[in-house]
Amino acid sequence: MKKVLSFIILMLLPMMAGAYDAKVGGIYYVFNQENKTATVTYRDSTSVYNGVIYSPQYSSDYEGDVVIPDAVTWEGVSYKVKSIGNGAFRGCPNLTSISIPPSITSIGYAFDGLSAVHISDLAAWCAMDFTIGYGSRWTPTMSNNPLYYTHSLYMNGEEVTDLVIPEGVTKIGNLAFQDCFSLTSVTIPSSVTSIGSGAFNGCSQLSAVHISDLAAWCAINFDVKNYAIWYGSGTFWAFYTSNPLYYAGHLYLDGKEITDLVIPEGVTSIGQNTFCHWPALTSVTIPSSIASIGLGAFEECRQLNAVHISDVGAWCSIEFDVQHANDGIAGDTVHTNNPLYSAGHLYMDGKEITDLVIPEGVKDLGDWTFVNLKNALASVTFPSTLESVANNSFKDITSLMTVRSYIKSPFHVDCFSDNTYRNGTLYIPTGTKDLYSRFDGWRSFLKIEEMELDPTPNGECATPTIIVMNNRFKFQCATPGATFTSTLTTAEEQFTGDEVVMNSDTTTYILTVYATAPGYSQSQPAKYMFTVNKTDVNNDGAIDVADIATIINKMASGARIQ
């Protein structure tokens, strides 16, 4: 019986040794005859113990510095080397380094130890996605990225410390530079649109991120992954973000470190985790063009103490959110997209807002819009257009002592702190107290006063702009619903009665324009000086005040001035 078993084993061994097709230049390959591609693999071995065959066993043939070629020729046929298979270099204690050509597009769980990774094409490396393998209880045990074991990357023979991603690269793959301890800085070009999960995870020496385009940086899709990891006697969440700023803590624009961040006008969105974990950031300016901010965009910006805006209405239109760790998001207690959560101070045109006026036209106030203004906000004024106020709009702001409401059709609210309800004063339009008392929230105020409220609670209307194109005059204003009044004067001529005394062949006029809007006081004047030939503009046979009126009407309507 033993002789029969031994015979069977000997017959099976050559059949089980077929893990590779050929060995060329000291490297084992499996060939795809259809696509003419090759995968780097290992020479398997078998072992027999107590009559039982154990297969495969990773070989230890690879040693020293292994250089994988772009292509390999076998039996007269050329194959492109496209991948490194699972286990290819596992169990090779004498392997010191691996050189990976740009033809490689995928790597399996091929390594378990080596000292250096050499590449010649950063763009090709960035295009690959890597993963982490887990053992029991979700403990990370392996990675298909050899940097997980080597901690250093070499480009054309030189160790990479200041990593410059080439212009034109659009994607940096998952875990692309994981545990690359040698990295001290990284430059991200404006062409990059996405960075995969954990791309710079474990880069403990990374201290600087360089960019050249803030708008492009705001548009990058940063990936975030959360893993349940068993540690000791319990489970904790491991947080992987793809943003290198999370690890570096310092962001440079055109070589200069940013501490006061100004988002460019025209940027409409800021992605998730875009400026997370940035201890050097002290202030941020959000333009009126911003419509959305991703979750965690300003998380862990512990030195952030000021948010600057130029348009309260635009700020109110942003949808803010807050999530807590027990909602399944890993990390600290709270994750939010509102920079006010860290800053606590909101500035409008350079002046801190203590008396907040929500402008006419705003219909809804969402959750967390004015989060954490605990020590700054003293009063708030609601416009007549407001239709809803989210419960968390002002709830934690204990300093809020004055609430003015122009709302003519009140609704249920639960947006103020207990301190505001007990010690603050609600001012409402004359004759509306009974109406307000029908709704929860409003009737909770212990002090309610009716009064003739300021008809211009929003302050001064924005100064209008006079636009001249091909002798056409247009008036514009940043305040919604603005209307215009204008006057025309001249320093050269004298007005007497219904006539104008003409002292020269041409007349220089000064156009003065004011803007007003509901809830706003009159703007500062805008002025424009222009010269016209003395002409009977309205064709009535006389050059008089009526001609001036015709000029003004044509300017206001955009008509051409002859």
Image (cartoon, helix red, strand yellow):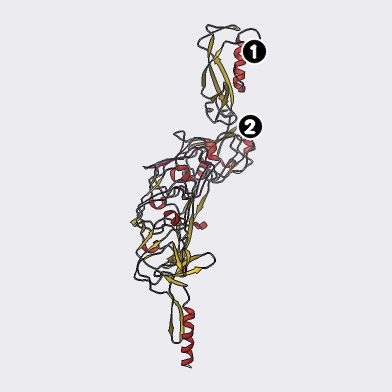
- How far across and down, in percent of the image, does residue 278 sit? 40, 48
Q: Residue at x 41, y 70 (%)?
A: 90
**Numbered circles on residues, count:** 2
The residue at which mark 2 appears reads as 431
Determine if residue 107 is in view.
no
- Asked whether 342 or 383 is in front, the reply is 342
Q: Residues within 10 Å of mark 1 (few under 14, many from 20)?
A: some
Q: Residue at x 49, y 83 (%)?
A: 12
- How far across and down, in percent of the image, does residue 102 sit? 44, 58
The main secondary structure of the magenta stretch is: loop
Amino acid type at image mark 2: Gly
Of circles 1 and 2, which is in front? 1
Q: Is residue 371 above or below residue 500?
A: below
Q: In this image, 255 relative to 362: left or right?
A: left
- How far across and down, in percent of the image, does residue 196 sit? 47, 55
Q: Residue at x 50, y 57 (%)?
A: 326
Q: Quadrant of residue 64?
A: bottom left
The residue at which mark 1 appears reads as 538
Q: Which residues are magenta?
A: 281-298
Q: In this image, 515 relative to 19: left or right?
A: right
Q: Residues within 10 Å of mark 2 (few under 14, many from 20)?
A: few
Label 2, secondary structure: give it.
Answer: loop
The verdict on residue 289 being magenta is yes
Q: Residue most toward the bottom?
A: 1
